[in-house]
């Protein structure tokens, strides 16, 4: 009986230590928009950090990969989130976005998915995610430090009319992009130091100066003040794109082990 008691205590201790470890995070989610409101002219940040978007000029609500999503007309649709100090100035950073491009601009210019850039000098720029189908852009992620621009560009255009899970990470030294859970491109950041701290709004689907409008759709989108690992990215992609499968445990940012058909357990 005593042995059973000690075994039970041991199991509880191991479980406690494991759960504590599993919940340990390298950083925080800065913003999380799931765009599941389905109506209205606001898209709410569900991270608790109140980075809410106001939607302008007739953005439509459509079905997405995870509930509802936003559809942008490529003419004048855009979202704006008012500036907060917590949106820039990081030493590491990740953007996760589920996007669908309906049409690339005919003039070859790029269009904005999400950015925190000003309209004036580079001193107002912190980070940005834009795309086109003309090399050398294709997809471009930028993190701007006081010493210069760190950017990574895609090696080929993103496909049209498909949902794409896109992740960019920067750990202060190296930048990676992932497409549909798989590492796509990497680049060494030429400039060290923290990202600029700037006081301009976050814009969604357009540049703040009312141009470079996206013709396409945006579903799930998150900002992190740390670099997601390849395992984190795989987990997020699998979670979002296999929603018909039942996840029996989810300790946030862990990876998934399939335990039988349509059932998974996630561990770090
Ligand atoms: Ca419009
Ligand atoms: Ca959604």
Image: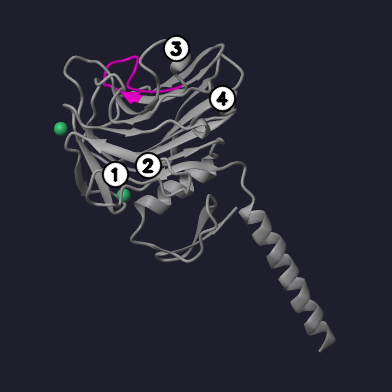
Q: Which residue is mark 1?
A: 42
Find residue 122 and name its label: 3
What is the distance, in whole Å, between disc 2 and disc 4 at their CAs? Answer: 30 Å
**In front here: 144 or 87?**
87
For discs 3 and 2, the disc positioned in front in the rendered view = 2
N-term-proximal mark, 2 vs 1 = 1
For discs 2 and 4, the disc positioned in front in the rendered view = 2
Element under label 2?
A: loop
N-term-proximal mark, 2 vs 4 = 2
Mark 3 touches mark 1? (CB < 8 Å): no
Q: Which residue is mark 2?
A: 52
For discs 3 and 1, the disc positioned in front in the rendered view = 1
Q: Is 165 placed left or right of 24 in the picture?
A: left
Q: Residue at x 33, y 39 (%)?
A: 53
What is the distance, in whole Å, between disc 4 and disc 3 at their CAs? Answer: 22 Å
**Which quadrant of the view contains residue 32?**
top left
For discs 4 and 3, the disc positioned in front in the rendered view = 3
Element under label 1?
A: strand
Q: Is residue 99 visible?
A: no
Residue placed furthest toward the right: 2
For discs 1 and 4, the disc positioned in front in the rendered view = 1
Q: Position of residue 226 (x, y in %)?
A: 56, 36
Find residue 174 and name its label: 4
Q: Is residue 256 magenta?
A: no
């Amino acid at each position: 009986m005593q042995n059973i008691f000690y075994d039970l205590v041991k199991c509880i201790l191991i479980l406690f230590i494991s759960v504590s470890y599993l919940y340990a995070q390298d950083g925080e989610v800065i913003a999380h928009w799931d765009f599941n409101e389905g109506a209205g002219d606001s898209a709410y940040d569900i991270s608790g950090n109140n980075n809410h978007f106001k939607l302008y000029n007739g953005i439509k609500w459509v079905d997405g990969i995870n509930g509802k999503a936003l559809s942008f007309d490529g003419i004048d649709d855009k979202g704006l989130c008012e500036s907060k100090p917590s949106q820039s100035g990081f030493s590491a950073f990740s953007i996760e976005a589920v996007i669908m491009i309906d049409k690339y601009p005919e003039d070859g210019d790029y269009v904005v998915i999400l950015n925190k850039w000003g309209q004036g000098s580079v001193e107002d720029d912190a980070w940005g995610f834009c795309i086109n189908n003309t090399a050398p852009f294709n997809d471009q992620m930028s993190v701007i430090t006081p010493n210069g621009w760190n950017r990574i560009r895609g090696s080929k255009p993103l496909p049209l009319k498909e949902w794409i899970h896109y992740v960019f990470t920067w750990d202060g030294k190296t930048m990676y992009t992932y497409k549909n859970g798989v590492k796509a491109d990497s680049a060494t950041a030429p400039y060290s130091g923290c990202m600029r701290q700037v006081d301009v709004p976050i814009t969604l689907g357009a540049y703040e100066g009312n141009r470079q409008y996206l013709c396409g759709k945006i579903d799930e989108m998150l900002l992190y003040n740390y670099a997601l690992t390849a395992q984190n990215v795989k987990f997020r992609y699998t979670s979002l794109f296999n929603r018909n499968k039942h996840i029996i445990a989810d300790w946030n940012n862990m990876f998934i082990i399939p335990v039988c058909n349509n059932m998974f357990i996630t561990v770090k």
